[in-house]
Amino acid sequence: MVLMMHSFYCDGLIGFKMEFLLQNILSPISRRIYKFWSINQNFNNLKRKLDELNNKLEDIDSALHIELHPRKRRKKEVEQWQKDVRKINIEVETIEQIIKRGLFLSRFCLGNIVVEKLEEVKELYWKGSTFGNLVIDEPLANRQILPMKVSEGEITAGRKFEEIWASLINDSVVMIGIYGMGGVGKTTLATHIYNRVSREKKFGLRHVYFITVSHNSRVYKLQDNIAKALHLDLSVANEEKIRAAILYEALATQKFVLILDDVWEPFLLEDVGIPICEKSCKVILTTRLLDVCRRMGCGKTFKVEPLPEEDAQKLFYAKLGHNFVFPTEVEEIVKSVAKECAGLPLAIITIAGSMRGIDNICEWRCALERLQESRKGYNGEEVIFEKLKFSFDRLKDEKVQNCLLYCALYPEDYEIPRHELIEYFIVEGLVEGKNRQAQFDNGHTILNKLESACLLERVVKDFGGMRCVKMHDVVRDMALQITRVFPRFIVQAGVKLRDMPDHEWWTKDLERVSLMKNRIIEIAPSLSPECKRLSTLLLQGNYFYRSIPDNFFLHMTGLRVLDLSDTAIGCLPASLLELKYLTALLLRRCKHLRYVPLLAKLTALRKLDLCDSGIREAPQGMGMLGNLRFLNLWAQNLQKLSMGILPRLSQLEYLVVYNPPNNSNARVEEILTLRKLETLVCNFDDWADYNACVRYLDELGIKDYAIRLGEHFLDVMNMHEESFNRKVILNGRSFRGQIIELLLPKNIQKLKIQYFDDANNMWDIFFSPSLGIDVEEWSQVTGSLEKLILFSMGSLKTLLRGEGPSALATFSFLKHLYILSCPKIKKLFPSGMLLHLPNLEKFVAYNCQQMEETFAEDEKETMDECDSNYDENDGMIYTLPRLKHLELTNLPELKSISPGLIRCDSLEAIAIILCPKLERLPLHCPWSSPPPCLKQIIIDSMDRWDALQWDDLTLKSILQPFLNIKTY
């Protein structure tokens, strides 16, 4: 027995040792031997993937050069990604050299490294596909002035401004509180302070930040807003204490003024991460409550009172229009109406706005009587609500009133994109028109009217960016007060709800509900609200990690608009598919949504938006949706759109559809059947299909489109644009070595061409006798072109081939011109072309290794042209009246911009980076003064600036104050 046990023990031990040997010693060796024998195959895979990664790097470099403006900078993560890609290129090159040497031991050791690098390249490629926006705004610390109308700022801010300013420059006062009732002018006063700090020399070393806090704002949200102003990334930290430490560290090194506008509840500054120390930082807060100032420890507090009667009259008349003269009998009534505004700037501005242009005594008498009635029985905040309600009632048009109330469905202080709002107006039936263009025109007209009535504020987001509107928080409160009665809304938008409201919350009289932009994780299986009158339900921007219960929509039989965009839903509940009155189903960016079930019963549906969703095939039963006007299927996982569906959607006005590689979802012959189409966005791999589509655009006169030919690259199109502005993007990478002939739509505005390596000039791509296109016709087609981008054109030597009036007229409407990474181009234009670019606003040349001249001397320039532009003292002078931005980067052979001087009275910024041979800056500055709009001249070193040659040193001295040295 002992022997047996011993034998069993020995066998087990030997077995264990053999298993250990195989798993821990031999197995890794065998894997390494396998990798050694597979190194050539793995390295070839690595090189192929690296080529794909480098193509993406080129695309991102190109997009960055277009998107970067003086007030934009690239994201830190994008900058790091670019460095990582360039680093791995060097590493792979080193590996390739070692492999070529053929050393056995080196190759043996490299097997693992090649596999690791292959994984790194794949990860970098994936990361490069997830950036979204590549650039962000420069922080407000760049001393940007906030917009404010002068009359309003002077009148409302002058009262307390000097007292507050005295406290601000007092080193012993760290925190200042400004309080007063809603609409009394606290934000205007804070804005005035912000702008004064931005301009004031004694605050020259301070950063200044303006942060809107808003009702229901929590510490977490406030941290996000401050981080955004500082351009800090807090996404790496979820705990408030860690986030606070990051903010504290960033702010502690600065001298700053932080303005916190519209604080409702007290909080500890240290909880947020705001350091407080004398002399180096100041905090100003505005609030409706003195108690908030006290509990937050403000060293000085200032109450903003209503305007005195004289100032109130001034502001009222300023908003009516100073050039308006009233008849004598009306004048006294006008003064009485102004007095009824109780000295509240917001009431004065909105009521004056609603009465602007009225000179009829009867209307003024009615207005006075109505305002006097509104005073009875109200105190405090209720007074201003009633005054604002007067302006609301004076809108008279019920649809305009409903459009204003619709804005209240968004979170407080939210900047609402105009085009997004108008899209809602269209599906809600709040705007009319025979087509989408007419509907958008009517929508903009309504928003303009609400802005003129001072019930909405105009906002332009980002630098030259999206047009938005915003509701003053008191106007929003008034709108929500109206909707507590009729029409019945409940709005809990952007208040960080984690749980869906329970059954009692969902009353039977509800018409519109907004729970957008919260953190709701799930809906209880038992919740099925009985809201038969509910027509609008906005749930976008929530988590919904679990599926929505099948019976949730069961009793919402009147639902017309449902927005579930930006949620994590994986499938749609069965009850949704029974909503026979549903007109709009919005599922944008629902990445986890792979499948949409049968939609055949939703016959009232007019809008279906699946942009950037995860769907792999088109919804079943879509061909039954005969009323569909708007269809967005730009989903890059979409592999199947069955033949015959599109022709059945004969009412379509707006179509966006993605064609995957080597598979056509949107067949040209099917698109051709859609005779009511106004907007078309699609992509093609086949140039013959592309040409057929262009002919279709011209035949129907479609004025809103984005068409792409060739393989995918980064800037396909911005799917959030209000209009695609007649855009064509051509990628020649797939057509190398082929002879192709391409058409352009006759009304094209934006054109991007890249990777056509066989083209010496643009006409090599488009000039085609077999298609019946000659120089004259091609010039007519491109006569509407406003933006042209040429990127990575390997053989491009000049922009145009040929001369004469037709050639010169090609770019007469051009506003933006980008020449990027075109290594063989030496001379872009003849100088005579400068006479035919009257609308050029931005010119960018980047990474063109052989470019010597942008505008080359033209010996054939006519005497008439020379005479009209010649000056005895300065020689030839060309005028680019609208040029704002001139950017020349990494042009190692560039010697001349122009043979003559250029006069640019609209010029705002010049950038000359890595142009070591540039001899002079040919600006014509008459009367020894700089261009009136000039803000900065960016150059890479003072030595480069000093090396420039000047015909007149006075010019150098007047331009030098605008220098901004940036080393690269």
Image: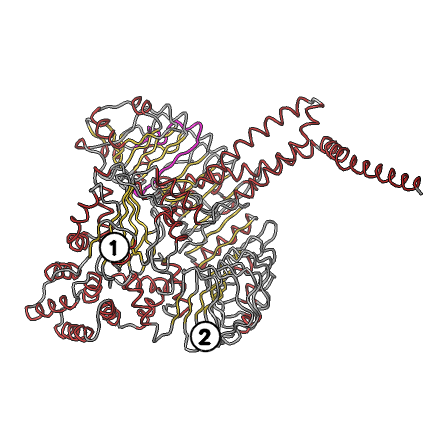
**Percent from the top left, x then y, of residue 858?**
33, 30
What residue would you read off at disc 2? Answer: 504
Residue 860 inside the magenta-drawn segment: yes
**Applied colour scheme:** secondary structure
Residue 472 picture quarter = bottom left
Mark 2 closeness class: few <14, some 14–19, many ≥20 residues within 10 Å? few
Q: Position of residue 839 (x, y in %)?
A: 31, 43
Specify the segment rendered in magenta.
838-861
**Front tag of 1 and 2:** 2
What's the residue type where badge 2 is placed? Glu
Q: Which residue is mark 1?
A: 187
Query: Which residue occupies the foreground of this view, 556 or 814?
Result: 556
Q: Does residue 851 show up magenta in the picture? A: yes
Q: Is residue 629 left or right of residue 16?
A: left
- SS majority, magenta: loop
> Which of the two labelled residues, at mark 1 and mark 2, occupies the earlier sequence position?
1
Disc 1, SS: helix
- For the point 30% across and 48% down, which residue is it? 210
Image quarter of the N terminus:
top right
The C terminus, quarter of image = top left
**Tag 1: Cα neighbours inside 10 Å, few (<14), some, or many (≥20)?**
many
Of 795 and 175, nearer the camera is 175
Q: Nearer the viewer, residue 955 or 76?
A: 76
Q: Name the residue located 24 percent from the left edge and 64 percent from the top edge.
A: 453
- Please tell me which residue is depicted at 34% across the width and 76% down the height of the picture: 485
Identity, as a three-letter code, of the amino acid under mark 1 = Thr
User: On the picture, is 391 further left or further right than 602?
Assistant: left
Residue 921, position as x, y percentages in the image: 29, 28
Image side of residue 350 versus residue 90, left or right = left
Whether residue 238 is visible to the viewer of this picture, yes or no, is: yes
Q: Quadrant of residue 847?
A: top left
